[in-house]
Image (tube, rainbow, N blue to C red):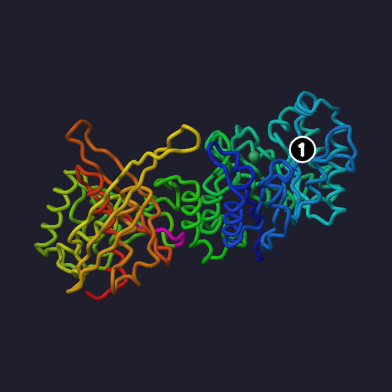
Amino acid sequence: MAKERLYLFDTTLRDGAQTNGVDFTLADKLTIAAMLDGLGIDYVEGGYPGANPTDTQLFSEDRKLRTTFTAFGMVRRPGRSTSNDPGLADLLNAKADAICFVAKSWDYHVRVALNTTLEENLTAIKESVRAAKAKGREVLLDCEHFFDGYKANREYALACAKAAYDEGARWVVLCDTNGGTLPHEVEDIVREVIKHIPGDHVGIHAHNDTEQAVANSLAAVRAGARQIQGTLNGLGERCGNANLVSIIPTLKLKPEFSERFDIDVSEAQLKALKHASHALDEMLNRAPNRHAPYVGESAFATKAGIHASAIMKEPATYEHVAPEAIGNKRRLLVSEQSGKSNVLAELDRIGLKVDKDDPRIARLLDELKEREAIGYAYEAADASFELLARRVLGTVPKFFDVTYFDVKVEQRTRNGQGSASVNEMLTTAVVKVKIGNDTLISAAEGNGPVNALDVALRKDLGKYQKYIEGLKLTDYRVRILNAGTEAVTRVLIESEDETGEHWATVGVSPNIIDASFQALMDSIVYKLVKDNAPA
Ligand SMILES: [Zn+2]
């Protein structure tokens, strides 16, 4: 039997942009739109032309995307004609493939918020859909507060949806704007709606106020809806929108959905999902949620020894899907509590063949325990663990030595305009590296001591330079362990290379520069080991 097509609609750039603390630039929006396009998302809603300069500019030219690039805006205002509404004109003139209108569908809101009659609201919907169709656009209607409206006045909510569908809107989208509707209610109501509008013209737009936006989206699909609206990482105001990063793998990997439905996301695109999720976090300067389903660092991590030994034998025993399908990986956490089996499993995963009775395993465990006691956190630093393991097992080549470094931070005061004086911070670092018989000296300026040290260290690594060209630091986190004068600093660095691989390294010291230096060194050495650089 042929599978039915399900459509994905991403609103990260419109509804997601309502998130507290999120402010996309035009360049951000273009990058994210390209990323969503690359993932195989059917519709990308870019924003609200006319509402702000960024969105107006975004829709001022054809962005040449494969996806159906969609502009969002309100239906014409009550009491105006479609030819005399500047907001609607901006929307109709936007360079977009589709227009997604939003309209009230709750009678109470029509009367109180819109201050107009129920009939005039229906006319506004019809005329707006007609005007956009006349412009050659595909048309969607977001029915705001649909579920609350349906409970209050079923006939009227349905009439709003029908008005758009009858005028030729491709999709009528049922919005749970307040996010308070529960999955069984969504399922019941969508089932009723599709008696009036065919399911392959019905969409769901769920908010996460009861942490069920994903469940509500899936419930709507079960009931017959065929378009799902959501955002990357569930971005969105208040508690967020339905998280497409959780929905997509569920649709692709869970037989109830994968056997019935096709989405335009291929297996290869699914493998890029974790990367896309993390790339968005990086752009927003947020640490990725380690516990995010499917894509989090901990989504396939196991700590307890007994589970680890079972996972080694048969991964499916403790995993609901294969981590590789989403571009994630299995992690067996190596920590103070970890047993020998975790360490063995982790060694196996990184490709180090060691007999389980090898005495070096006990040495490695002791070393781990000692280091964790003084603050190292190997659970969060897979690459530093791998290097430590390789060192104890005797297989890390001596690539280079840093024989000297010097970091200087200066504050200079100079006279600014008028009588004001301006303080400037200047940071420089000098690093001496010995490679074989050569000594290389590099100096660099940076926007802080760690940055200057990093730049100087990576400026000239002689014959290793070509290996680290594509290396970049993607996250730098500092934590002070035990308060007071005895405090030590733990630095965690995340790195990425030209292949998109991520790894994390750790350094611990009473001195933040030293801790950062250790983590930086581990990151570089890990990259050389990974690429089989010659000793
Ligand atoms: Zn919304």
Of residues 55 and 333, the one drawn nearer to the viewer in this rendering: 55
Of residues 228 and 506, the one drawn nearer to the viewer in this rendering: 506
Q: Reply yes or no: does residue 374 show up in magenta.
A: no
Q: Is residue 186 left or right of residue 153?
A: left
Q: Is residue 125 visible?
A: yes
| Residue pictured at 13% horizontal, 48% vertical | 370
Hey, which quadrant is residue 487 in on the image? top left
| Residue 227 sits above or below residue 351 on the image | above
Q: Which residue is mark 1?
A: 103
Q: Quadrant of the N terminus?
A: bottom right
Across and down, in percent, residue 160 comes to 80, 38
| Residue 235 sits above or below residue 398 on the image | above
The number of numbered discs placed on residues in the rendered structure image is: 1
Hey, which quadrant is residue 117 in on the image? top right
- Furthest residue toward bottom: 534
| Residue pictured at 90% horizontal, 43% vertical | 83
Q: Is residue 335 left or right of residue 301?
A: left
User: Where does the magenta region start and end?
Assistant: 325-331
- Please tell me whether mark 1 sits on a helix, a strand or a loop: strand
Q: Quadrant of the C terminus?
A: bottom left
Disc 1 crowd rating (10 Å Cα; few below 14, some 14-19, many 20+) is many
Amino acid identity at mark 1 = Ala
| Residue 255 sits above or below residue 106 on the image | below
